[in-house]
Amino acid sequence: MALNIDGIADFVETVLDEYVEKESKAWVDISLPLQKYHFAEKWFKDKKKPVKGGPRCKWKLRTDNQGTFKHTGLFATDKTNRKNVMTGAKQEWSMQTVNYIFDLREEEFQGENWQVIVDTMETLELSLYNDFFAGMETSMWTAPASSSTDPRPPSGIPFWLQKCTTLGFNGGDPSGFTDGAGGISTSDYADWKNYGGPYVEVSRDDLIEKVINAMDFCYFKPPQDFSQIGSGQPAWGLYTVHSVLATMRKIMESQNDNLGHEAGWGANGEVMLRRTPVTWVPALTNSASDAYDSENPFYGINWNLFQYFFQENQNMVKHPLKQASQQHAVRERHMDNAGNFVCYNRREGGFVFHVA
């Protein structure tokens, strides 16, 4: 016997999340346009997700030293000095929401086959996550237009790693953010700039050489070890568009004996620079994507100093099904999220090159 409207609603609410046995799916998913979603891969697969509390994400940044070193001699007088060498960085939270609705009178909910109902609801549940991860993938590879943008989008990697026209630590403040990334202006603290520059072609002597050198220049090893965020050897990730990766593969194939120890092949055929695989980013490559970048960027990211934090108690919160306003047979489900990307140290956190 077919379930009535209240029976369907109760079944969906109490059984769907616990229903495990699925002999086959009656649908195929071709809804996602990108081949890979880096946000979902990096921050969703782990059971323990990075979380921070508070109205915004905060951390401390050491910007100077006391400067008391001097040469001295017998009976020399001391010269003491004390100044504030710390400043506070902050990043506001960004909020997202996704949802789906269904009508309990739809054909799929009529009849006695509960598996049909489960399969129907599973497609809706999947669309909830697909929508979320597709949106966050775009956010990961884009930057907000300005600090006044409302609602506030996340501050993705291009926000923290700014392109620059001169090679070196010249990545300045994000456009539209007069206070600088993380509330720190590079006009006040020049060492807050990231490394970057232009390149003309994908070759051993141009882009590849610049990437290898950047991995040298962005590693600042203190003379004495001490506890700090992201200390130790950088955990590099290298990301670019597909055309750049394809050209690198051709270079590897044609000049394999002349590349030295800096470049090589991975176990699964990946292009490796300094034993770090070069990965292509579909969101930056696909011209239909809002994150598409025609300047063929090449990002180096030190994941010890980059993070996406979910705001405490706002980590992809999925709310119970509820009746839609003024639609007694319609049910809706919402999922809310709050968080943002953070780079603790732009000088060591990474670099970006782009076509001049």
Image (spheres, rainbow, N blue to C red):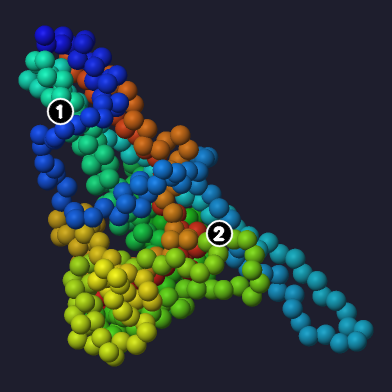
**Residue found 74% across the figure and 78% down from its top:** 69
Please state the horizontal and vertical placement of residue 200, each as a whole percent of the image: 25, 82
Q: Quadrant of the C terminus?
A: bottom left
Q: Which residue is drawn at 39% across and 47% down?
A: 46
4 relative to 76, above or below: above
For residue 171, above or below residue 202: above
The answer to whether residue 297 is seen in the rendering is no
Residue depicted at 30% across the width and 72% down the height: 266
Most foreground residue, 181 or 22: 22
Secondary-structure class at tag 1: helix
The tag on residue 12 is none
Q: Which of 66 and 3 is in front in this view?
A: 3
Q: Is residue 285 visible?
A: yes
As drawn, which residue projects farthest toward the right? 75
Tell me where residue 5 sits by quadrant: top left
Q: Given the image, on which type of amino acid does mark 1 rest?
A: Thr
> In front: 62, or 299?
299
Q: According to the image, label 1 marks what residue?
A: 120
Residue 218's place in the image compared with 305, above or below, is below
Q: How crowded is mark 2: few (under 14 residues within 10 Å), some or many (20 or more)?
A: few
Q: Does label 1 or label 2 sit earlier along the sequence?
A: 1
Q: Which of marks 1 and 2 is in front?
A: 1
Question: How many numbered dots are placed on residues in this image?
Answer: 2
Residue 314 in percent (x, y) is at 42, 36
**In what quadrant of the picture does the N terminus appear?**
top left
> In the structure shown, which secondary structural element does the residue marked by tag 2 occupy?
loop
Residue of label 2 = 229
Residue 324 image position (x, y, % from top left): 23, 19
The residue under label 2 is which amino acid type?
Ile
On the image, the x and y values in percent for residue 171 come to: 41, 70
What residue appears at the point 29 percent right and 90 percent down from the top-left corner? 258
Q: What whole-number distance in Å separates the C-alpha atoms at marks 1 and 2?
A: 46 Å
